[in-house]
Amino acid sequence: MIKDSDPLNDAANDPTPATAAATPWVERILRVMDHVQAHLDDDLTPDTLASLAGFSLHHFHRVFRGMVGQSVMEYVRDRRLERAAFRLKFGTATVTQVAFDSGYGSHEAFTRAFRARFAMPPSAYREQALAQREGDVDVTLRQEPEQPVLCWRHVGAYDGASETWTALLGFAGQHGLFGPHTRILGFVYDDPEIVPADRLRYDAALTLSPTQAAALAAVSLPRGARLAVFPAGHYALTLHIGPYDQSDVAYVRLLGQVLPRRGVELASDAIIEVYLNSPMDTPPEALRTEILVRLTP
């Protein structure tokens, strides 16, 4: 998990550009982490990632390890293995193909790395995932337009995001961002069965009007907040009714059972949760959450 610390006031000895130096270190490292996730098939060299963060390579290694808890290339390797686990869990490619797609030159090397990360070989992991797929869910397709959103990043266990939600909703209330068409969202980037709890990434979010987004773009947002977009596209969605911490059943059935039979391809986006009612005035068993997965054209 990223450790939030005050930047050192050492601009005179910092060789990075002034624009980079003016950005808090946490945001610079988060930029690298998001870039890695979006470009896992690219050649992610330490030089390239250091430049993206605005650090010299010499300093970048130590800064990244100190703030994230592992070296940058260990981080890249783990993200690729986590994606491989996702593909084994929900996809139909062979283990060998998943190994090659993950950058491994042989089935054996991939198996060793996968076993070290998940405590079982990839074939056993896939069999275990298949054994868990029971039942079915109702799935509909819906076209969504692009819409600006205000996001507040949480890193850690999903059930520990209450402070993030308090910050987002408090800011939105103070700035009059709630309206009749506001949607309350969660951007879910990681599978908690694959990614360690302290590294799970989640954005608490709400939709904005174009006017609201333009106004916020002109001000300095609090740390952790950023403007993003709800991507336009064709989405498969299912409705989960019940406590948030029981939604994984719907996830597994949607991604691992229904969509594979329909022969669709998934975009490499976060899964979006749309919260249709509030836990503040709704009992857990009556909570309604739409789970949306964007499909590729």
Image (cartoon, rainbow, N blue to C red):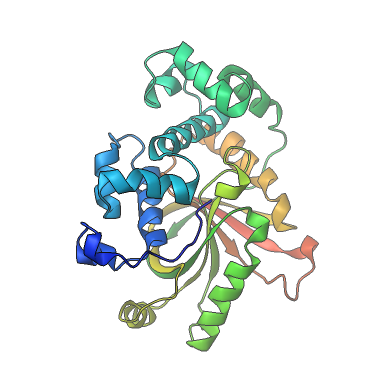
Residue for point 38% across, 54% down: 29
Seen in the picture, residue 9 relative to 236 is either above or below; the reply is below
Residue at screen point 41% across, 55% down: 30
Query: Residue at 76% across / 71% down in the picture?
Result: 282
Give how far across and how far down residue 84 sits, in percent.
Answer: 48, 30
Residue 122 vs residue 14: left or right?
A: right
Q: Residue 178, how many percent across, how many down?
A: 52, 82
Q: Is residue 83 above or below residue 248?
A: above
**Residue 107 visible in image:** yes
* Total number of numbered discs in the rendering: 0
Q: Is residue 208 above or below residue 49?
A: below
Residue at 44% over, 41% down: 266
Task: Tell whether 53 sits left or right of 203.
Answer: left
Q: Nearer the viewer, residue 223 or 218?
A: 223
Tell me residue 93's x, y (percent).
Answer: 47, 22
The answer to whether 256 is drawn above or below residue 4 in the figure is above
Q: Quadrant of the C terminus?
A: top left
Q: Nearer the viewer, residue 91 or 68?
A: 68
Q: Quadrant of residue 104?
A: top left
User: x, y (%) of residue 77?
Assistant: 43, 32
Using the rendered image of the protein, determine whether residue 230 is visible from the camera's viewpoint: no
Q: Quadrant of residue 147?
A: bottom left
